[in-house]
Image: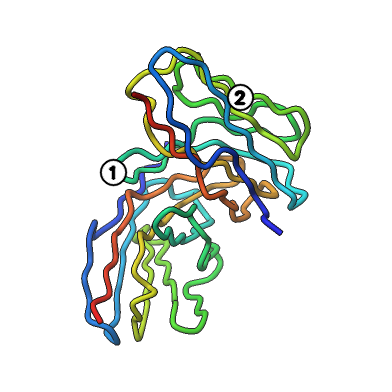
Amino acid sequence: GENVEQHPSTLSVQEGDSAVIKCTYSDSASNYFPWYKQELGKGPQLIIDIRSNVGEKKDQRIAVTLNKTAKHFSLHITETQPEDSAVYFCAAQRLGNQFYFGTGTSLTVIP
Amino acid sequence: DTAVSQTPKYLVTQMGNDKSIKCEQNLGHDTMYWYKQDSKKFLKIMFSYNNKELIINETVPNRFSPKSPDKAHLNLHINSLELGDSAVYFCASSQGGLQPQHFGDGTRLSIL
């Protein structure tokens, strides 16, 4: 099955700085990569996703990059704000299969 | 309107009891899931149903039994609760295929 590794497990940044979270996957047939944000006491919420036919996708302060050759993808958050503090999960999926989640990154944005 | 709703939000009970968690989605999705999130925040899939049919059943004790009365509902019944069952359980739904999953806000189960 798929194996998704996520780093770092914790990340602290100053408000206004950028944050980068990286994930690697093992199944070269995986072709859907969503990112989720989980706030305290809430369920994971989709913030951005990318499919394998695209190398980069951006939505305001959030961007995701995908390198299919190296089998890794990254989440980039620019101009971080305190409300970005949460746990972030990456996931990988191949058609007909389940989501495989990374182990999560706890992001703290220091005001 | 809440897209994926779970009840109850908190469940505190004694070891050995039987309990159920209910999940409903109003997104018109065909596929529903149950996940377990442990204290280290790891999300582990337990079950997946597509149009009321079980399609994923990970290595879960048979004390856990999902039931899908219709494609908008997926309930989780747990028999003979054990201390290790303490966790947050999330329900999710999706259109299937390569589409995002939408999660409920979870049920925190605490076993005394």
Position of residue A19 in the picture relative to residue B26 (left or right):
left
Residue A111 at x, y percent in the picture: 25, 82
Q: Chain of mark 2?
A: B
User: A87 or A63, which lies in front?
Assistant: A87
Mark 1 is on which residue type? Lys
Residue at image x 53%, y 70%? A54
Residue A52 at x, y percent in the picture: 52, 62
User: How many tags in the picture?
Assistant: 2
* Secondary-structure class at tag 1: loop
Residue to which mark 2 is pinned: B66
Residue B13 at x, y percent in the picture: 43, 24
For the N terminus of chain B, which image quadrant? bottom right
Q: Which disc, if any, is residue B40?
A: 1
Q: Chain of mark 1?
A: B
Q: Are both tags, 1 and 2, on one chain?
A: yes
Residue at image x 38%, y 64%? A73
Q: How is the image coloured?
A: rainbow
Position of residue B107 in the picture relative to residue A86 (left or right):
right
Residue at image x 35%, y 86%? A79
Few, some or many residues within 10 Å of mark 1 (<14, 14–19, 20+): few
Q: CA distance from mark 1 to mark 2?
A: 24 Å
Q: For residue A84, what is the image quadrant?
A: bottom left
State whether residue A5 is above or below residue A10: above
Please report whichever mark, 1 or 2, sits nearer to the chain's N-terminal start. Answer: 1
State whether residue A78 is above or below residue A12: below
